[in-house]
Amino acid sequence: MSKVVSMRDAIAAHVHDGDTLVIEGFTHLICFAAAHEIIRQRRRNLTLCRLTPDVVFDQMIAAGCASKLVFSWAGNPGAGSLHAFRRAVEAKPRTLEIEEYSHFGMVARFSAGAARLPFWPLRNYQGTDLPAANPMIRSVDCPYTGESIATVPPLNPDVTIVHAQRADADGNTQVWGLLGVQREAAFASQRVIVVVEELVPEAVIRADPNRTIIPGMVVDAVVVEPWGAHPSYAQGYYDRDNEFYVAWDSVSRDASRLEAYLDEWVHGVADRAEYLRRQPSIIDRLTAKSAMSGEVSYGY
Amino acid sequence: MEWSPSEMMVVAAARELRDGEVVFVGIGLPNLACNLARLTHAPNLVMIYESGAVGARPDRLPLSIGDPSLVTGSLMICGMADVFQMLLQGGHIEVGFLGGAQVDRYGNINTTVVGDYAQPKVRLPGSGGAPEIAIHAKRTLVIARLDKRAFPERVDFITSPGHRARGGTRKELAMPGAGPVRVITDRGVLAANSETGELELHAIYPGTSVDDVRAGIGWDLLVRDALGTVNPPSSEELRLLREVVDPQRHFLR
Protein backbone atom coordinates (compact mmCIF):
# COMPACT_ATOMS: atom_id res chain seq x y z
CA MET A 1 0.00 0.00 0.00
CA SER A 2 1.32 3.41 -0.90
CA LYS A 3 2.52 5.63 1.97
CA VAL A 4 2.85 8.66 -0.29
CA VAL A 5 1.22 11.79 1.16
CA SER A 6 1.69 15.54 0.89
CA MET A 7 4.09 17.34 3.23
CA ARG A 8 1.14 19.13 4.83
CA ASP A 9 -0.63 15.85 5.59
CA ALA A 10 2.52 14.09 6.77
CA ILE A 11 3.33 16.81 9.32
CA ALA A 12 -0.32 17.12 10.42
CA ALA A 13 -0.57 13.38 11.02
CA HIS A 14 2.81 12.64 12.59
CA VAL A 15 4.25 15.74 14.31
CA HIS A 16 2.43 16.85 17.45
CA ASP A 17 2.95 19.58 20.04
CA GLY A 18 5.38 18.38 22.71
CA ASP A 19 6.99 15.70 20.53
CA THR A 20 10.64 14.78 20.55
CA LEU A 21 11.56 15.46 16.94
CA VAL A 22 14.64 14.51 14.95
CA ILE A 23 15.45 15.97 11.54
CA GLU A 24 18.77 14.32 10.75
CA GLY A 25 21.34 14.68 7.98
CA PHE A 26 24.94 15.76 8.59
CA THR A 27 25.28 18.83 6.34
CA HIS A 28 23.86 16.60 3.56
CA LEU A 29 20.10 15.95 3.09
CA ILE A 30 18.74 18.24 5.83
CA CYS A 31 15.01 18.49 5.24
CA PHE A 32 14.27 22.21 5.36
CA ALA A 33 10.95 21.63 3.55
CA ALA A 34 9.65 19.63 6.54
CA ALA A 35 10.97 22.16 9.06
CA HIS A 36 9.20 24.97 7.20
CA GLU A 37 5.92 23.07 7.17
CA ILE A 38 6.24 22.43 10.93
CA ILE A 39 6.76 26.18 11.42
CA ARG A 40 3.74 26.95 9.23
CA GLN A 41 1.58 24.53 11.23
CA ARG A 42 2.80 26.30 14.40
CA ARG A 43 3.91 23.28 16.39
CA ARG A 44 5.00 24.17 19.93
CA ASN A 45 7.08 22.76 22.81
CA LEU A 46 9.08 20.42 20.62
CA THR A 47 12.27 18.80 21.90
CA LEU A 48 14.50 19.16 18.86
CA CYS A 49 17.37 16.68 18.48
CA ARG A 50 20.20 16.77 15.94
CA LEU A 51 23.97 16.44 16.10
CA THR A 52 24.27 19.85 14.42
CA PRO A 53 21.22 22.08 14.98
CA ASP A 54 22.32 23.96 11.83
CA VAL A 55 20.31 26.74 10.24
CA VAL A 56 17.30 24.40 10.14
CA PHE A 57 16.85 24.34 13.92
CA ASP A 58 17.95 27.98 14.25
CA GLN A 59 14.89 28.82 12.14
CA MET A 60 12.62 26.56 14.23
CA ILE A 61 13.95 28.06 17.48
CA ALA A 62 13.35 31.58 16.12
CA ALA A 63 9.83 30.56 15.07
CA GLY A 64 8.97 29.48 18.61
CA CYS A 65 8.60 25.73 17.91
CA ALA A 66 11.18 24.51 20.44
CA SER A 67 11.30 24.26 24.22
CA LYS A 68 14.42 22.07 24.37
CA LEU A 69 17.44 21.30 22.19
CA VAL A 70 19.53 18.11 22.32
CA PHE A 71 22.72 18.49 20.27
CA SER A 72 26.48 18.20 19.92
CA TRP A 73 27.64 21.14 17.77
CA ALA A 74 25.62 24.33 17.42
CA GLY A 75 27.46 26.45 14.88
CA ASN A 76 27.12 27.50 11.26
CA PRO A 77 30.02 25.62 9.65
CA GLY A 78 32.61 27.90 8.13
CA ALA A 79 30.28 30.88 8.52
CA GLY A 80 29.79 31.77 12.20
CA SER A 81 27.13 31.38 14.86
CA LEU A 82 23.51 30.28 15.02
CA HIS A 83 22.24 33.50 16.49
CA ALA A 84 18.65 32.52 17.38
CA PHE A 85 20.14 29.62 19.36
CA ARG A 86 22.66 31.94 21.01
CA ARG A 87 20.07 34.55 21.93
CA ALA A 88 17.93 31.86 23.58
CA VAL A 89 20.82 30.31 25.53
CA GLU A 90 22.57 33.56 26.49
CA ALA A 91 19.28 35.14 27.71
CA LYS A 92 18.95 35.41 31.49
CA PRO A 93 17.08 33.29 32.26
CA ARG A 94 17.61 31.18 29.16
CA THR A 95 14.52 30.57 27.06
CA LEU A 96 15.62 27.21 25.66
CA GLU A 97 16.54 24.15 27.68
CA ILE A 98 19.64 22.37 26.39
CA GLU A 99 21.16 18.90 26.76
CA GLU A 100 24.52 18.52 25.07
CA TYR A 101 26.82 15.68 24.11
CA SER A 102 29.66 15.30 21.63
CA HIS A 103 29.06 13.85 18.16
CA PHE A 104 30.19 10.42 19.36
CA GLY A 105 27.76 10.69 22.26
CA MET A 106 24.83 11.58 20.00
CA VAL A 107 25.71 8.80 17.56
CA ALA A 108 25.86 6.38 20.51
CA ARG A 109 22.46 7.59 21.76
CA PHE A 110 20.89 6.83 18.38
CA SER A 111 22.66 3.45 18.26
CA ALA A 112 21.22 2.52 21.68
CA GLY A 113 17.80 3.77 20.62
CA ALA A 114 17.84 1.77 17.39
CA ALA A 115 18.94 -1.40 19.19
CA ARG A 116 16.43 -0.80 22.04
CA LEU A 117 19.23 -1.01 24.60
CA PRO A 118 19.19 0.87 27.94
CA PHE A 119 22.53 2.61 27.26
CA TRP A 120 25.52 2.60 24.90
CA PRO A 121 29.11 2.34 26.13
CA LEU A 122 31.86 4.52 24.72
CA ARG A 123 35.42 5.21 25.74
CA ASN A 124 35.06 8.95 26.08
CA TYR A 125 34.58 12.06 28.25
CA GLN A 126 37.30 11.36 30.84
CA GLY A 127 39.02 14.61 31.80
CA THR A 128 36.24 16.81 30.34
CA ASP A 129 33.61 18.97 32.03
CA LEU A 130 30.83 17.46 29.92
CA PRO A 131 29.55 14.90 32.49
CA ALA A 132 29.27 17.74 35.04
CA ALA A 133 27.33 19.84 32.53
CA ASN A 134 25.08 16.96 31.49
CA PRO A 135 24.24 14.42 34.21
CA MET A 136 22.88 12.03 31.55
CA ILE A 137 26.52 11.24 30.68
CA ARG A 138 27.40 8.52 33.17
CA SER A 139 29.66 5.48 33.44
CA VAL A 140 29.64 1.75 34.21
CA ASP A 141 32.31 -0.68 35.29
CA CYS A 142 32.91 -3.23 32.56
CA PRO A 143 31.74 -6.66 33.85
CA TYR A 144 34.71 -8.35 32.13
CA THR A 145 37.69 -6.08 32.78
CA GLY A 146 36.49 -3.71 35.51
CA GLU A 147 37.36 -0.71 33.33
CA SER A 148 35.19 2.33 33.89
CA ILE A 149 33.51 3.24 30.64
CA ALA A 150 31.24 6.17 29.75
CA THR A 151 27.60 5.59 28.89
CA VAL A 152 24.85 7.59 27.27
CA PRO A 153 21.12 6.84 27.33
CA PRO A 154 19.13 5.78 24.26
CA LEU A 155 17.44 8.43 22.13
CA ASN A 156 14.03 7.22 20.96
CA PRO A 157 12.31 10.14 19.23
CA ASP A 158 8.57 10.32 18.69
CA VAL A 159 9.21 11.19 15.08
CA THR A 160 12.24 11.29 12.78
CA ILE A 161 12.31 13.03 9.41
CA VAL A 162 14.88 11.89 6.87
CA HIS A 163 15.50 13.42 3.45
CA ALA A 164 16.78 11.03 0.76
CA GLN A 165 17.51 10.90 -2.94
CA ARG A 166 14.86 8.30 -3.64
CA ALA A 167 12.39 5.80 -2.22
CA ASP A 168 9.56 3.63 -3.45
CA ALA A 169 5.96 4.14 -2.36
CA ASP A 170 6.42 1.77 0.59
CA GLY A 171 9.33 3.81 1.95
CA ASN A 172 12.27 1.63 0.99
CA THR A 173 14.80 4.45 1.02
CA GLN A 174 18.08 4.82 -0.84
CA VAL A 175 20.79 7.32 0.02
CA TRP A 176 24.27 7.89 -1.36
CA GLY A 177 26.89 10.39 -0.35
CA LEU A 178 27.27 11.27 3.33
CA LEU A 179 25.10 8.98 5.46
CA GLY A 180 25.25 10.73 8.84
CA VAL A 181 23.14 8.92 11.46
CA GLN A 182 19.92 8.70 9.48
CA ARG A 183 19.76 4.90 9.55
CA GLU A 184 20.17 4.74 13.34
CA ALA A 185 17.77 7.66 13.89
CA ALA A 186 15.06 6.09 11.74
CA PHE A 187 15.32 2.72 13.51
CA ALA A 188 15.27 4.47 16.91
CA SER A 189 12.11 6.44 16.17
CA GLN A 190 8.46 5.65 16.93
CA ARG A 191 7.39 7.24 13.61
CA VAL A 192 9.40 7.99 10.46
CA ILE A 193 8.72 10.40 7.61
CA VAL A 194 10.89 9.99 4.52
CA VAL A 195 11.07 12.95 2.12
CA VAL A 196 12.56 12.25 -1.30
CA GLU A 197 13.80 13.97 -4.39
CA GLU A 198 12.30 11.20 -6.52
CA LEU A 199 9.71 8.49 -6.07
CA VAL A 200 10.84 5.36 -7.93
CA PRO A 201 9.25 1.98 -8.71
CA GLU A 202 10.08 -0.88 -6.36
CA ALA A 203 12.08 -2.49 -9.20
CA VAL A 204 14.60 0.38 -9.07
CA ILE A 205 15.18 -0.32 -5.37
CA ARG A 206 15.43 -4.06 -5.96
CA ALA A 207 18.02 -3.55 -8.71
CA ASP A 208 20.43 -2.01 -6.17
CA PRO A 209 19.54 -3.21 -2.65
CA ASN A 210 22.92 -2.32 -1.09
CA ARG A 211 22.02 1.34 -1.48
CA THR A 212 18.92 1.04 0.74
CA ILE A 213 19.58 2.46 4.21
CA ILE A 214 16.04 2.40 5.60
CA PRO A 215 13.57 -0.40 4.84
CA GLY A 216 9.90 0.40 4.29
CA MET A 217 8.86 -1.52 7.40
CA VAL A 218 9.99 1.33 9.67
CA VAL A 219 8.58 4.12 7.48
CA ASP A 220 5.15 5.69 8.09
CA ALA A 221 4.95 8.31 5.35
CA VAL A 222 6.70 9.13 2.09
CA VAL A 223 6.68 12.72 0.81
CA VAL A 224 7.92 13.63 -2.66
CA GLU A 225 9.54 17.06 -2.45
CA PRO A 226 12.17 17.96 -5.07
CA TRP A 227 14.73 20.47 -3.72
CA GLY A 228 13.28 19.81 -0.27
CA ALA A 229 16.71 19.98 1.35
CA HIS A 230 17.74 23.42 0.03
CA PRO A 231 19.87 25.26 1.32
CA SER A 232 21.35 21.89 2.36
CA TYR A 233 22.10 19.59 -0.56
CA ALA A 234 21.39 16.24 -2.18
CA GLN A 235 24.43 14.51 -3.69
CA GLY A 236 23.96 14.05 -7.42
CA TYR A 237 20.95 16.42 -7.47
CA TYR A 238 22.01 19.85 -6.19
CA ASP A 239 24.90 21.51 -4.40
CA ARG A 240 24.91 23.05 -0.93
CA ASP A 241 23.91 26.70 -1.06
CA ASN A 242 26.98 28.01 0.73
CA GLU A 243 26.01 31.60 -0.11
CA PHE A 244 22.80 31.12 1.87
CA TYR A 245 24.66 29.65 4.85
CA VAL A 246 27.19 32.50 4.86
CA ALA A 247 24.40 35.09 4.59
CA TRP A 248 22.54 33.45 7.50
CA ASP A 249 25.11 34.82 9.93
CA SER A 250 23.97 38.40 9.32
CA VAL A 251 20.28 37.51 8.83
CA SER A 252 20.07 35.60 12.11
CA ARG A 253 22.19 38.15 14.02
CA ASP A 254 19.28 40.59 13.82
CA ALA A 255 16.06 39.15 15.28
CA SER A 256 13.86 41.40 13.13
CA ARG A 257 15.66 40.41 9.92
CA LEU A 258 15.27 36.77 10.88
CA GLU A 259 11.56 37.30 11.47
CA ALA A 260 11.26 39.00 8.08
CA TYR A 261 12.97 36.01 6.49
CA LEU A 262 10.47 33.61 8.09
CA ASP A 263 7.57 35.84 7.03
CA GLU A 264 8.71 35.89 3.42
CA TRP A 265 10.11 32.39 2.84
CA VAL A 266 8.24 30.19 5.33
CA HIS A 267 4.88 31.74 6.29
CA GLY A 268 4.74 33.63 2.99
CA VAL A 269 4.75 30.54 0.78
CA ALA A 270 2.23 27.73 0.70
CA ASP A 271 4.71 24.94 0.20
CA ARG A 272 8.13 24.01 -1.18
CA ALA A 273 6.92 24.24 -4.77
CA GLU A 274 6.09 27.93 -4.27
CA TYR A 275 9.41 28.48 -2.44
CA LEU A 276 11.14 27.18 -5.57
CA ARG A 277 8.96 29.06 -8.06
CA ARG A 278 9.83 32.33 -6.36
CA GLN A 279 13.59 31.80 -6.65
CA PRO A 280 14.21 29.94 -9.91
CA SER A 281 17.84 31.11 -9.95
CA ILE A 282 18.80 28.55 -7.30
CA ILE A 283 18.13 25.80 -9.82
CA ASP A 284 20.57 27.28 -12.34
CA ARG A 285 23.12 28.03 -9.68
CA LEU A 286 23.06 24.74 -7.74
CA THR A 287 22.01 21.86 -10.03
CA ALA A 288 24.69 19.16 -9.69
CA LYS A 289 26.94 18.18 -12.53
CA SER A 290 26.97 14.51 -13.37
CA ALA A 291 29.48 12.05 -11.87
CA MET A 292 28.00 8.59 -12.51
CA SER A 293 29.04 5.61 -10.39
CA GLY A 294 30.44 2.42 -11.82
CA GLU A 295 28.07 -0.49 -12.19
CA VAL A 296 28.27 -3.81 -10.37
CA SER A 297 26.61 -7.13 -11.05
CA TYR A 298 24.29 -8.60 -8.42
CA GLY A 299 24.12 -11.84 -10.40
CA TYR A 300 24.89 -15.29 -9.00
CA MET B 1 57.95 37.02 -0.67
CA GLU B 2 55.70 38.63 1.95
CA TRP B 3 53.40 36.35 3.95
CA SER B 4 50.71 36.78 6.57
CA PRO B 5 50.63 35.21 10.06
CA SER B 6 47.70 33.00 8.95
CA GLU B 7 49.69 31.71 6.01
CA MET B 8 52.64 30.93 8.28
CA MET B 9 50.31 29.06 10.66
CA VAL B 10 48.89 26.90 7.91
CA VAL B 11 52.35 26.15 6.51
CA ALA B 12 53.72 25.29 9.98
CA ALA B 13 50.75 22.97 10.57
CA ALA B 14 51.13 21.30 7.17
CA ARG B 15 54.78 20.53 7.88
CA GLU B 16 53.77 18.63 11.04
CA LEU B 17 52.05 16.00 8.87
CA ARG B 18 53.98 13.04 7.49
CA ASP B 19 53.34 11.32 4.20
CA GLY B 20 50.99 8.35 4.49
CA GLU B 21 49.49 9.35 7.82
CA VAL B 22 45.79 9.03 8.59
CA VAL B 23 44.51 12.42 9.66
CA PHE B 24 41.14 13.49 11.03
CA VAL B 25 40.53 16.83 9.34
CA GLY B 26 38.69 19.76 10.86
CA ILE B 27 37.19 22.66 8.97
CA GLY B 28 38.95 25.99 8.46
CA LEU B 29 42.72 26.29 8.89
CA PRO B 30 43.26 22.55 9.61
CA ASN B 31 41.58 21.76 6.32
CA LEU B 32 43.92 24.16 4.52
CA ALA B 33 46.93 22.62 6.27
CA CYS B 34 45.98 19.07 5.29
CA ASN B 35 45.30 19.98 1.69
CA LEU B 36 48.58 21.94 1.48
CA ALA B 37 50.48 18.95 2.92
CA ARG B 38 48.82 16.65 0.38
CA LEU B 39 49.89 18.94 -2.48
CA THR B 40 53.49 19.19 -1.21
CA HIS B 41 55.36 16.64 0.90
CA ALA B 42 52.52 14.26 1.84
CA PRO B 43 50.74 13.11 -1.36
CA ASN B 44 49.61 9.91 0.36
CA LEU B 45 47.97 11.62 3.35
CA VAL B 46 44.68 9.86 4.11
CA MET B 47 42.16 12.56 4.99
CA ILE B 48 39.19 11.43 7.08
CA TYR B 49 36.32 13.81 7.80
CA GLU B 50 33.94 13.16 10.69
CA SER B 51 31.09 13.36 8.19
CA GLY B 52 32.14 9.91 6.95
CA ALA B 53 34.46 10.63 3.99
CA VAL B 54 37.57 8.46 4.14
CA GLY B 55 40.47 9.24 1.80
CA ALA B 56 38.79 12.38 0.48
CA ARG B 57 40.37 14.35 -2.38
CA PRO B 58 38.19 17.46 -2.62
CA ASP B 59 38.69 19.46 -5.82
CA ARG B 60 37.43 22.66 -4.19
CA LEU B 61 37.87 24.17 -0.74
CA PRO B 62 35.09 22.71 1.42
CA LEU B 63 33.27 25.42 3.40
CA SER B 64 31.79 22.79 5.70
CA ILE B 65 32.97 19.45 6.95
CA GLY B 66 30.12 17.78 5.05
CA ASP B 67 30.72 19.32 1.64
CA PRO B 68 29.66 17.21 -1.38
CA SER B 69 33.17 17.58 -2.87
CA LEU B 70 34.46 15.35 -0.05
CA VAL B 71 32.36 12.49 -1.40
CA THR B 72 33.19 12.58 -5.11
CA GLY B 73 36.27 10.42 -5.68
CA SER B 74 36.68 9.38 -2.04
CA LEU B 75 37.95 5.92 -1.00
CA MET B 76 35.00 5.18 1.28
CA ILE B 77 31.87 6.80 2.60
CA CYS B 78 30.58 5.42 5.89
CA GLY B 79 28.03 6.37 8.50
CA MET B 80 29.07 8.42 11.50
CA ALA B 81 28.67 5.49 13.90
CA ASP B 82 31.43 3.76 11.92
CA VAL B 83 33.58 6.90 12.00
CA PHE B 84 33.49 7.25 15.77
CA GLN B 85 33.19 3.64 16.89
CA MET B 86 35.53 1.90 14.46
CA LEU B 87 37.87 4.45 12.90
CA LEU B 88 38.45 6.73 15.90
CA GLN B 89 37.76 4.55 18.96
CA GLY B 90 39.23 1.64 16.99
CA GLY B 91 42.59 3.41 17.03
CA HIS B 92 43.07 4.16 13.33
CA ILE B 93 43.49 7.93 13.52
CA GLU B 94 47.12 9.01 13.74
CA VAL B 95 46.66 12.78 13.79
CA GLY B 96 43.72 14.88 14.91
CA PHE B 97 43.39 18.62 14.40
CA LEU B 98 41.68 20.79 16.98
CA GLY B 99 40.95 24.47 17.34
CA GLY B 100 39.27 26.38 20.11
CA ALA B 101 38.27 29.66 21.65
CA GLN B 102 40.47 28.95 24.67
CA VAL B 103 43.60 26.81 25.11
CA ASP B 104 45.25 26.58 28.52
CA ARG B 105 48.64 25.81 30.04
CA TYR B 106 48.13 22.04 29.75
CA GLY B 107 46.53 22.06 26.31
CA ASN B 108 42.94 21.72 27.54
CA ILE B 109 40.57 23.24 25.00
CA ASN B 110 37.29 25.06 25.47
CA THR B 111 34.76 25.28 22.65
CA THR B 112 31.68 25.30 24.89
CA VAL B 113 31.17 28.54 26.84
CA VAL B 114 32.95 31.69 27.93
CA GLY B 115 32.00 32.23 31.55
CA ASP B 116 29.80 29.97 33.63
CA TYR B 117 28.15 26.99 31.91
CA ALA B 118 24.66 27.71 33.28
CA GLN B 119 24.87 31.48 32.64
CA PRO B 120 27.36 31.89 29.79
CA LYS B 121 28.76 35.24 28.70
CA VAL B 122 29.26 33.77 25.25
CA ARG B 123 27.77 30.50 24.11
CA LEU B 124 30.20 28.76 21.73
CA PRO B 125 29.20 25.93 19.36
CA GLY B 126 30.12 23.09 21.75
CA SER B 127 31.89 19.77 21.37
CA GLY B 128 31.35 18.41 17.90
CA GLY B 129 33.78 15.52 17.62
CA ALA B 130 36.58 17.30 19.49
CA PRO B 131 36.51 15.51 22.89
CA GLU B 132 36.78 12.06 21.31
CA ILE B 133 39.49 13.24 18.89
CA ALA B 134 41.42 14.72 21.84
CA ILE B 135 41.14 11.42 23.70
CA HIS B 136 41.71 8.91 20.89
CA ALA B 137 43.88 10.37 18.09
CA LYS B 138 47.48 9.12 18.48
CA ARG B 139 48.53 12.77 18.60
CA THR B 140 46.72 16.06 18.15
CA LEU B 141 47.74 19.37 16.65
CA VAL B 142 46.02 22.51 17.88
CA ILE B 143 45.71 25.64 15.76
CA ALA B 144 44.82 28.90 17.53
CA ARG B 145 45.66 32.60 17.30
CA LEU B 146 47.49 34.06 20.29
CA ASP B 147 45.59 36.38 22.60
CA LYS B 148 45.67 36.57 26.39
CA ARG B 149 41.95 35.76 26.54
CA ALA B 150 42.39 32.82 24.17
CA PHE B 151 45.34 31.40 26.14
CA PRO B 152 44.32 31.64 29.82
CA GLU B 153 46.03 29.76 32.63
CA ARG B 154 42.85 27.64 32.93
CA VAL B 155 40.03 27.34 30.44
CA ASP B 156 36.50 28.18 31.60
CA PHE B 157 35.26 24.73 30.52
CA ILE B 158 37.20 21.64 29.45
CA THR B 159 35.58 20.45 26.25
CA SER B 160 38.64 18.52 25.02
CA PRO B 161 41.23 17.26 27.50
CA GLY B 162 44.93 18.10 27.22
CA HIS B 163 47.76 16.78 29.38
CA ARG B 164 46.34 17.58 32.81
CA ALA B 165 42.60 17.67 32.62
CA ARG B 166 39.66 17.36 35.03
CA GLY B 167 40.69 14.67 37.52
CA GLY B 168 44.27 13.96 36.49
CA THR B 169 46.83 13.29 33.80
CA ARG B 170 46.14 11.47 30.53
CA LYS B 171 47.77 8.35 31.95
CA GLU B 172 45.71 8.46 35.14
CA LEU B 173 42.56 8.92 33.06
CA ALA B 174 43.51 6.08 30.65
CA MET B 175 43.40 8.13 27.46
CA PRO B 176 44.68 6.18 24.46
CA GLY B 177 46.22 9.12 22.54
CA ALA B 178 49.25 11.30 23.32
CA GLY B 179 47.19 14.50 23.33
CA PRO B 180 48.16 17.94 21.97
CA VAL B 181 51.85 17.60 21.12
CA ARG B 182 51.98 20.93 19.25
CA VAL B 183 50.00 24.15 19.45
CA ILE B 184 50.49 26.14 16.28
CA THR B 185 49.84 29.85 16.77
CA ASP B 186 50.21 32.94 14.61
CA ARG B 187 53.53 33.88 16.25
CA GLY B 188 55.21 30.58 17.05
CA VAL B 189 54.78 26.92 17.92
CA LEU B 190 54.24 25.60 21.45
CA ALA B 191 55.08 22.03 22.42
CA ALA B 192 54.06 19.99 25.43
CA ASN B 193 56.77 19.07 27.93
CA SER B 194 56.94 15.28 27.87
CA GLU B 195 57.11 15.06 31.67
CA THR B 196 54.97 17.87 33.01
CA GLY B 197 52.55 18.20 30.10
CA GLU B 198 52.93 21.99 30.21
CA LEU B 199 52.98 23.90 26.94
CA GLU B 200 56.35 25.57 26.29
CA LEU B 201 57.64 27.79 23.52
CA HIS B 202 59.26 25.46 21.02
CA ALA B 203 59.91 27.70 18.00
CA ILE B 204 59.12 31.20 16.83
CA TYR B 205 58.34 32.52 13.36
CA PRO B 206 60.78 34.71 11.47
CA GLY B 207 60.30 38.33 12.49
CA THR B 208 58.66 37.55 15.85
CA SER B 209 60.22 37.58 19.29
CA VAL B 210 59.73 35.62 22.50
CA ASP B 211 58.08 38.72 23.97
CA ASP B 212 55.60 38.82 21.04
CA VAL B 213 54.53 35.30 21.92
CA ARG B 214 54.43 35.96 25.67
CA ALA B 215 52.21 38.99 25.08
CA GLY B 216 49.49 36.65 23.84
CA ILE B 217 49.67 34.09 26.64
CA GLY B 218 48.00 34.29 30.03
CA TRP B 219 50.55 32.35 32.07
CA ASP B 220 54.30 32.55 32.61
CA LEU B 221 55.38 30.73 29.46
CA LEU B 222 58.52 28.61 29.67
CA VAL B 223 60.92 28.96 26.74
CA ARG B 224 63.00 26.01 25.61
CA ASP B 225 66.79 26.38 25.71
CA ALA B 226 67.05 25.16 22.14
CA LEU B 227 64.47 27.60 20.84
CA GLY B 228 64.04 27.14 17.11
CA THR B 229 62.98 29.46 14.32
CA VAL B 230 60.49 28.09 11.82
CA ASN B 231 61.51 28.39 8.17
CA PRO B 232 59.35 30.95 6.39
CA PRO B 233 56.83 29.72 3.82
CA SER B 234 58.45 28.83 0.51
CA SER B 235 57.24 30.54 -2.64
CA GLU B 236 55.71 27.23 -3.74
CA GLU B 237 53.82 26.80 -0.45
CA LEU B 238 52.48 30.33 -0.77
CA ARG B 239 51.52 29.84 -4.40
CA LEU B 240 49.57 26.65 -3.61
CA LEU B 241 47.85 28.26 -0.64
CA ARG B 242 46.81 31.35 -2.59
CA GLU B 243 46.01 29.82 -5.97
CA VAL B 244 44.81 26.30 -5.17
CA VAL B 245 43.93 25.72 -1.53
CA ASP B 246 42.08 28.93 -0.56
CA PRO B 247 41.98 31.18 -3.65
CA GLN B 248 39.02 33.18 -2.33
CA ARG B 249 40.79 33.66 1.02
CA HIS B 250 37.79 32.33 2.86
CA PHE B 251 39.82 31.15 5.83
CA LEU B 252 43.16 32.91 5.22
CA ARG B 253 42.98 36.30 6.80
Image (cartoon, coloured by chain):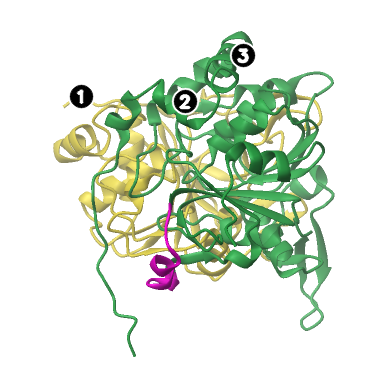
Chain colours: A green, B yellow
The circle drawn on residue A22 is none
In the displayed image of the protein, which residue is found farthest to the front? A1
Q: Nearer the viewer, residue A116 or B152?
A: A116
Q: Nearer the viewer, residue A171 or A44?
A: A171
Amino acid type of disc 3? Answer: Glu
In 3D space, how far apart are the residues under numbered discs 2 and 3 (Cα atoms)?
17 Å
Which subunit holds the residue at mark 2?
Answer: A
Q: Quadrant of residue B112?
A: top right
Q: Which residue is mark 3?
A: A259
In 3D space, how far apart are the residues under numbered discs 2 and 1 (Cα atoms)?
48 Å
Highlighted magenta segment, given as a residue range? A199-210
Q: Quick check: is A204 in the magenta stretch?
A: yes
Looking at the image, residue A225 sits to the left or right of residue A81; the answer is left
Looking at the image, residue A71 sits to the left or right of residue A238; the answer is right
In the displayed image of the protein, which residue is found farthest to the top? A256
Q: Quick check: is A221 in the magenta stretch?
A: no
Q: Which residue is mark 1?
A: B2
The circle drawn on residue A275 is 2
Element type at mark 2: helix
Which subunit holds the residue at mark 3?
Answer: A
Element type at mark 3: helix
Task: Let me know if marks 3 and 1 both belong to one chain.
Answer: no
Which mark sits nearer the N-terminus, 2 or 3? 3
Which subunit holds the residue at mark 1?
Answer: B
Amino acid type of disc 1? Answer: Glu
In 3D space, how far apart are the residues under numbered discs 3 and 1 (Cα atoms)?
45 Å
Residue B222 visible in the displayed image? yes
Query: Badge 2: few (under 14), some or many (20 or more) residues near its Cα, within 10 Å?
Result: some
> Do the numbered discs 2 and 1 sit on residues whose CB atoms are within 8 Å?
no
Which is closer to the viewer, label 2 or label 3? 2
Q: Position of residue B119 (x, y in %)?
A: 80, 25
Residue at screen point 81% across, 31% down: B118
